[in-house]
């Protein structure tokens, strides 16, 4: 499985905002963005003035890092969004939100998207009672997502479920009473994506 090797806290500092890549650590005083709120590197504390292209590039990199997607895969998402009806930027974000690893994270089954990706990869998650181990699997309206019975006592899952009320669950997902299963009520709308993202900058970048 291809993955980025850049330290997660370094990624947050590069984008100058918390991307919540390390789960609960991001909510504590140990968070690197609270201790060193400036870009990494020797010139990190200097003044930085980005060109128009630089601003667009940073926005694209930020979204990629939030969802844990590599460049080639992100380009495929954009190409698919550009072919579909609707506002390209919003369709792009909708596709990223529908990724199974993101849904598992948003439901509170995992403390971070990276942890959710591992849960999916290792076969702990079922969709409509069938095991799915592909993190990029796109959920649809009516799909039921659940933690398989043998994994319900998993320490990481239990700890994460205990913090689900603090993070909250988006309206397009309906969490079951046991908090270990959920149903996709509708496709995510733009208002459901609360992370400050300016998707139009990404569209402008790829439109050049």
Image: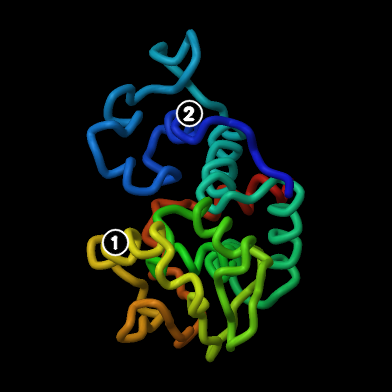
In the rendered image, the residue lying farthest to the bottom is 142
Q: Along the horizontal axis of the image, is 78 left or right of 187?
A: right
Considering only order in the chain, which callout, 2 or 1, is on the residue closer to the N terminus?
2
| Pick the front one: 14 or 91 | 14
Numbered badge on residue 167: 1
Q: Is residue 59 above or below residue 170?
A: above
Q: Tag 2's secondary structure?
A: helix
Dot 1 crowding, Cα within 10 Å, few <14, some 14–19, many 20+: few
Residue at left offset 53%, top offset 55%: 199
Residue 122 rendering spot, x and y as whole percentages: 62, 62
Please rate how many residues cluster around mark 2, counting C-alpha atoms within 10 Å: few if below 14, some from 14 to 19, many from 20.
some
Q: Quadrant of residue 82?
A: bottom right
Residue nearest the observer in this picture, 145 or 152: 152
Tell me the element at label 1. helix
Q: Could you give the CA–CA distance between mark 1 and mark 2, rounded to whole angstroms?
A: 23 Å
Colour setting: rainbow
In the rendering, at what x and y percent does residue 28 appear? 24, 39
Q: Position of residue 42 (x, y in %)?
A: 48, 8
Quadrant of the image occupied by residue 193: bottom left
Percent position of residue 110, x then y:
43, 60
The residue identified by callout 2 is 10
The answer to whether 208 is drawn above or below residue 54 in the figure is below
């Amino acid at each position: 499985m291809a993955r980025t090797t850049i330290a997660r806290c370094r990624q947050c500092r590069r984008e100058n905002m918390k991307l919540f890549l390390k789960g609960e650590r991001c909510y504590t005083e140990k968070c690197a963005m609270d201790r060193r709120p400036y870009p990494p590197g020797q010139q990190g504390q200097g003044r930085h003035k980005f060109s128009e292209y630089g601003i667009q590039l940073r926005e694209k990199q930020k979204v990629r890092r939030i969802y844990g997607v590599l460049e080639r895969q992100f380009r495929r998402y954009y190409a698919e969004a550009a072919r579909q009806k609707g506002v390209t930027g919003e369709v792009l974000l909708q596709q990223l939100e529908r990724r199974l690893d993101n849904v598992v994270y948003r439901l509170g089954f995992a403390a971070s998207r990276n942890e959710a990706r591992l849960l999916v990869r290792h076969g702990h998650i079922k969709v409509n009672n069938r095991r799915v181990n592909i993190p990029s699997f796109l959920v649809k309206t009516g799909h039921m997502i659940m933690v398989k019975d043998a994994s319900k006592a998993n320490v990481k899952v239990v700890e994460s479920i205990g913090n689900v009320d603090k993070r909250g669950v988006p309206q397009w997902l309906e969490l079951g009473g046991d908090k270990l299963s959920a149903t996709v009520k509708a496709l995510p709308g733009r208002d459901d994506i609360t992370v400050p993202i300016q998707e139009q900058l990404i569209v402008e970048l790829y439109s050049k």
